[in-house]
Image (tube, rainbow, N blue to C red):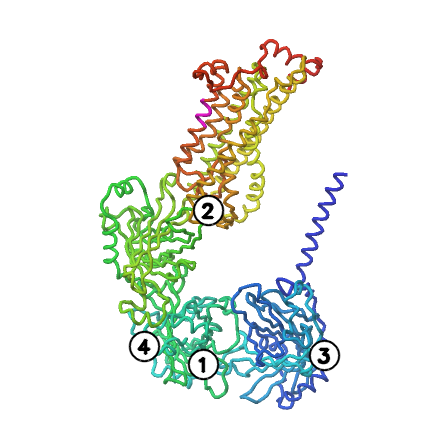
Amino acid sequence: MKGFLAFGGIFSGLLVLFCFGYAKSYLVDGEFGGRLRSRNSMTYKYERMDEVKKECSFVLSSASNLRPADDIVYSLREELSFLNGDWWQESNGEDPIMPFDNDTLNLGTPSKLVSFWVTDVSRARRSKKWIGVSGALLMGITSDSLFMEKPYEGSPHFDIWPGHSQLSVSFQGVYAESEKNGGERVMCLLGQTMLPSRQPESGDPWQWVKESGYVNQPPLVQDDRILLVLRYPRTFTLVRRSIRGSMKSLNLKSNLKFFSKISMSSWLAASANYEFGSEKIVSRACDPYPYKDSLMNGDFDVYKGLDFCNILDKFTKQEALTIVPNWKCNGTDDFCSKLGPFRTDKEIKVTDGSFKDVKLVIQDFRCQEMTVQGDPGFRRISSVFRAVPPSEKKFIAAERTGLNNMTLSAEGIWKSSSGQLCMVGCLGLLDSEHTGCHSRVCLYIPLSFSIKQRSIIMGTFSSIDGGTRPYFPLSFDKLVRPAELWDQFTAARPFYKYSKIDAAGAVLEKSEPFNFGNIVKKSLLKFPKLEGTETFLVSLSLLSEDLTLHIPAVPDSFSSSFLSRTDFQMEIVSLGPLFGRYWSPNVSTTEQENPYHDKAEYTEKQLLLNVSAQIGLTGKSYDNFSVLFVEGLYNQHVGKMYLIGCRDVRASWNILHESMDLEAGLDCQIEVMVSYPPTTASWLVNPTASISISSRRNEDDPLYFRPVKLQTFPVVYRGQREDILSRRGVEGSLRILTLSFAIACLLSQIFCIRDNADSVPYISLVMLGTQALGYSLPLITGAEAIFEKMSSESYENPSYDLEKSQVIRVIDYTVKLLVLVAFSLTLRLCQKVWRSRIRLLTRTPLEPHRVPNEKWVLLTTLTIHVIGYAIVLFVHSLSTSHRPLQTERFIDSSGKSQTLREWETELEEYSGLIQDLFLLPQIIGNYVWQLHCKPLTKFYYIGITAVRLLPHVYDFVRSPIPNPYFSEEYEFVNPRFNFFSKFGDIAIPVTAAVLAVIAYVQQRWNYDKLSQILMRGQSKLLPLGSKVYERLSSVSAEAELSSGVNANAGNQKDDDGE
């Protein structure tokens, strides 16, 4: 029967997996509430063509003859489809088409997106002026999604869940071309779908959205009276790049299916050919070329190579650029708070010219290479600039294709002679009169960098001839990231200019006076430094990797990982003469071919390396540090950086304008120190980095900020994997040794029972139960860890030392096997004690009062530990009074998210203390039972005590951060949670040793001798002797143990054999 049930369970599991796999072959039109829809091919039946001709007569009446070529059938599918355009209703909220639920979630400003696909072009249904087409439309309101996947046309529907609403509509209609508006392509289609139902005569037509369960069963109503008209420009140019659409209901306004007119906007797909030819418009902005903007004469070199387009596309594709504050503006608040040519709504107005968290994305980038008068360094470039407000999701903005007042369509030229990209910009939806092209865009790719110039892309928007809407020139940039510096850009040899080295030297002299500690550090500890086995540039590149930090950090004043923390990022931009990383192995100079250790010995000053970096901190507590640029010196002897910092201040434009000491709009009155942990002695020294950031301004200065001191999580340097595995192996080997010794102690106690059978009943079962519980917990929790390791092996870095990893696994399994053996031996010892007491109960005459009773031992032990736990918990709460007892989630050193309840954690840690004091129940029992024998062997209780104390000794001498490279896996105590301190690592062993001494004294002298020794006057420290537990002679005890009253010889033989 059991086998049949097991087979049935396996079969059910396989059936579930099969159903899940089958379900994956269907399309789900949403993350929640979507319905499974088959991907089977559609059969298109143009049954509504007569109705289409009637409703689309205004399109067909102006249609021109179509070209006879058959390629139109294939080109329409790609050219007329678009993704993630914009839609809006112009009825001031009357008769909306769909509801949206944003009450339960705070996901930022929702976006109204629409996508359209041409799904079929009919060869059979066509005339000289039109051709039959089918399409699918997906539109909605979303806070966190894009409409990238075509819906299933066979069942158009409406879906809604918190933060997302979407409606799919199936269409059929006609495609035609017209000479109107300079030539356009038009689609007129009739659609059908299931609209969300509105409640009649109600102030809130979507009242059902507020009811529970609306996600699974939204009320829907069928509607096939929907007209969609999409207009495309025949030629794709700067001022004719937009797709315009309108969708309206053909129902009467009194009908509940009626919705107000919907307008749509997008641009042509990437497959459409863009026609460069707007020279007249471009010349308004860029003649004469190059235009002398504010950056043209900047203190930086510019890229002039022929790979300009590739580099620009690489650094801007799916990447957001930063808007620079108007710190130079000197005008009215309205003028200086404008976001350049873009619409300045309330959300941007509230930034007061600082443009905090406002981004810029470059979309639809197109480049045409040309040779003019024999010069190949000429490019025509077109793109769309989109401004992204703070509340909009950046990944959604990067995929949107709608044109509006936050978009600037641009076209221009780039010449290698100057390196300037000059473009004319046209705002929003354009018309044939070119009325919106009043902006100029100038863009550069710098080659030289400094503490005040960290941008790999720089540019400005400026007004042409004042325009109809003048604005202060708006600057934008994209910060350099060393990991991106490769390929064509690196081949152009970018470089860094140091300018704050003298100021950093003053910080070094002030912060590093001569002291004995620095001498010890220099002589005993080693910190990240240049390696002598590599060439100079390779050594600099490897050292840059070690000095780069991407790691969580907490305030240095608190050591607990329960506190709120920040993600600390420090990217090394340049180190010595090396900018970025050393990628190219083909550069061969005498300097680079010689190993670094072949150079002459360097002086103390020459061992200081120039360094520049970028620091970023996340979290509301660090809003003052959106970006921090630093430059200074790195001391390889002591592993410290002494830096001058410049921060990107996001204050209002008038505060920035009134601050006379800004450098390129940056606050450079900042001192930064970064201390790295040593690469050696990581077991004995805290392997964390410390960061100090302070302002040199007066406290009454509006740009002053309080000092920031941080301590990072443990830092793992490049190449320390072997040390990590070595440490793991050492700790595992120590556990094997201690467990083996504990097993030997248990075996000695079991063997001793044969020679000392009369004292077996006086071994405390509470003591043995405590030990058994301690051995069972690792077996229970370790089982999950085994499976977790097996499931995660395939995701590990293949560069790890596989052989040593296998050794670690063998050690782990050996430890678990030894724990199981120790647990079994402890249970065997419990069994023998229990059976010896049963024999005492069954002897003649029956004297159950002579059998040791554990009642008072258990109650006394529990009372002591409950009081002890309460005291420790109270003391611990006082020491952490800066934070309440609460539940927190944190990321441990292995990167896994953990949920911690402090009282549960402290109870778990206290259980380790109970195991350390395992002799306490035995000592209480010896006192209660008025012991006259030696139930425990010296080797047993002294050996087990030593085993329990060894982890405390190890914790005391090793690194302050326990197990900095792996998750917490401690059998005894875990100092990470601030429960056991260094004092505990001393106090606990001392207490355990005292208990061992008491147990020795109790067994060394019997109860009578102890009573005489501890007699004081007429009182005794021990109670009067009692005959309740008066011991029999050893002879009679052995006789009764060997025979029993009702036991025969067979039973005796069985017992002896156990």
State which quarter of the image contains the N terminus: top right
CA gap, disc 4 and disc 1: 26 Å
Q: Is residue 26 magenta?
A: no
Give SS at disc 1.
Answer: strand
State the residue position of label 1.
Answer: 426
Point out the tag, 4 or 1, that comes first from the N-terminus. Answer: 4
What's the mark number on residue 330?
4
Residue 386 can be seen in this image:
yes
Amino acid at the residue labelled 3? Tyr
Q: Amino acid at mark 4?
A: Asn
Mark 4: give few (<14), some (14-19) or many (20+) Cα within 10 Å.
Answer: some
Q: Is residue 716 visible?
A: no
The disc, 3 or 1, on the residue closer to the chain's N-terminal end is 3
Rendered image quadrant of residue 989: top left
Residue 752 image offset from top left, x and y in percent:
55, 17
* Magenta residues, start to end: 992-997
- Kindly identify which residue carries mark 2: 893
Q: Is residue 265 left or right of residue 420?
A: right
Secondary-structure class at tag 2: loop
Residue 426 found in image quarter = bottom left
Instruction: Name which of mark 4 and mark 2 comes first in the sequence.
Output: 4
The label shown at residue 46 is 3
Question: Answer yes or no: do the residues labelled 2 and 3 have beta carbons within 8 Å?
Answer: no
Q: Is residue 639 left or right of residue 724?
A: left
Q: Of residues 861 and 889, which is closer to you in this image?
A: 861
Which comes sooner in the sequence, label 1 or label 2?
1
Give the label, 2 or 3, closer to the camera: 2
Q: Amino acid at mark 2?
A: Ser
